Amino acid sequence: MFIGGEKYNPIQAETFDVINPATGELIETVSSASSDDVEKAIQSCADAFNPWSQKSYAERAAVLSEISTVLKEKEYLEKLAVTLTKEQGKPLTESRREIEGVIGVIDYFTGLSSSLHTDFFENKNNQSYSFTLKKPLGVCVSILPWNMPTLILSWQMIPALLTGNTCLVKPSSVCPLTILELAALFHQAGLPAGVFNVVTGSGEKIGSQLAASPAVRKISFTGSVDAGRSIGVEAAKYNKRVTLELGGSDAMIVCDDVDIRDCASKAVQTKFFNGGQACISPKRIYVFESVFDQFVQAVLESVSKIRLGNGLSEKTTMGPLSSAGGQKQMIEFVASAKAEGAKILAGGKIPEGDEFKNGYFFEPTVITNVPPSSGLLKEEVFGPIMVINPVSDLDEAIFEANHSDFGLGASIWTNDIRRAKRGFEELEAGIVWVNQHTKVLPELPFGGVKDSGFGRENGYESLNDYLETKTVVFKF
């Protein structure tokens, strides 16, 4: 844990192990926060709130900019990337890219600090004036997932810190170490003690306590639908603000007027990025019948070039799943697909070989002709399984894409502007891409509809989620 500007280890505490998913080896044993530890962290945030919130935007931006400067130093970036790969499993190239993404988020939001504004009105009839003030909320909580922990942390906490709030972070127990290293780096770069605290341990227990705490004014959660609903219900009892990002089952529509080989190559890149463990990876691909066979063949050629292995090897292009539970789920999905009559064209099993026997590896898998009732199409498949189904036309493709409880992202691949327009107007998703997928920029809002949650992260508008608006009317 990291509380009050320093590493915090309770004398008597339950612990949990952080395991390297590529080797099955113990990386570190970490303390689980007790109820008292959580209260200590909340109080630390509360105590730090007044002095931090009373600083100007420019002063806070300067501190955050210094964090960005430190992260840009190769020594620090590489150290964080190695820790992230060890505990999460992704290849080093992807870990480096994630940390670089954090830098991009900091630089974007700190660049906004001088452009933040309020409203001013003059009422000449009664010679009065009115204006609005923006005030920070107080203690804001971030409950993180394990797939992109540092990037999602930056989406949630950088705008919170910039607007004068203090932050309490609960990382996933799968990979808490990188977040703890970041907390120490933030403090080293000049963030005052207590402004940014980290508690580790059970998400269910700690999440419930944070949602019920009267001192916590905002919760940002990324995780499962069930957990998000529980947090939302508990937070509503105390009128807390919440932002919920609850996953997705993104659809990708491939029309018959695009470069099929190029499209297939990009589909493989985006789907198997981070081992398929990304909320916005394309999980359901609908391809026009006339180019279906050509697309599938091109996908199989690209998949054959994926190099599975330990993420610490520069030769690796796809690492293991992050947990044994994730590996087990992939096995179950493939077994169900076979029973349903789907075709397994690649992968579908744990790879053989000594380098894979102790880790949580699963081969990149391609499955076609999956029935609409299958869990592969109805659930969020968080792993390296690509599902490809044929469709007769755009009407059927959009219908199938929208036939989901999720609505985070979707994409349409076409060179016809009329088809593209139908895609971004009719697809039920918070983000729609045309001729690309998974591209996320800090200046654009990120979030979903339906069971994918509500609220938005990133973009200028996300700053208002961390601010109260006060209206002032005066007359002299």
Image (cartoon, rainbow, N blue to C red):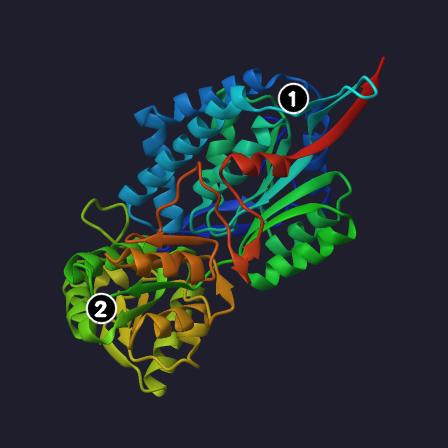
Question: Residue 280: x and y, percent?
Answer: 40, 55
Which of the 4 image quadrants contains residue 224?
bottom right
Circles 1, 2 touching at the beta carbon (< 8 Å): no
Question: Residue 449: x and y, percent?
Answer: 53, 58
For mark 2, give the secondary structure: loop
Which of the 4 image quadrants contains residue 391?
bottom left
Q: Which mark is residue 352?
A: 2
Label 1 sits on residue: 52
Viewer-side residue, 186 vs 160: 160
> In 3D space, how far apart are the residues under numbered discs 1 and 2 (Cα atoms)?
54 Å
Type of the residue with mark 2: Glu
For mark 1, give the secondary structure: helix
Which residue is at a point 30% across and 26% down the rendered structure image?
Answer: 74
State which mark lies toward you, 1 or 2: 1
Which residue is at a point 68% across and 31% down the rendered structure image?
Answer: 45
Which residue is at a point 31% across and 59% down the rendered structure image?
Answer: 418
Q: Is residue 389 left or right of residue 125?
A: left
Q: Is residue 456 above or below residue 303?
A: above
Question: Residue 40: x and y, percent?
Answer: 71, 36
Q: Is residue 66 left or right of residue 36?
A: left
Q: Is residue 355 above or below residue 134?
A: below
Residue 384 can be seen, yes or no: no
Type of the residue with mark 1: Trp
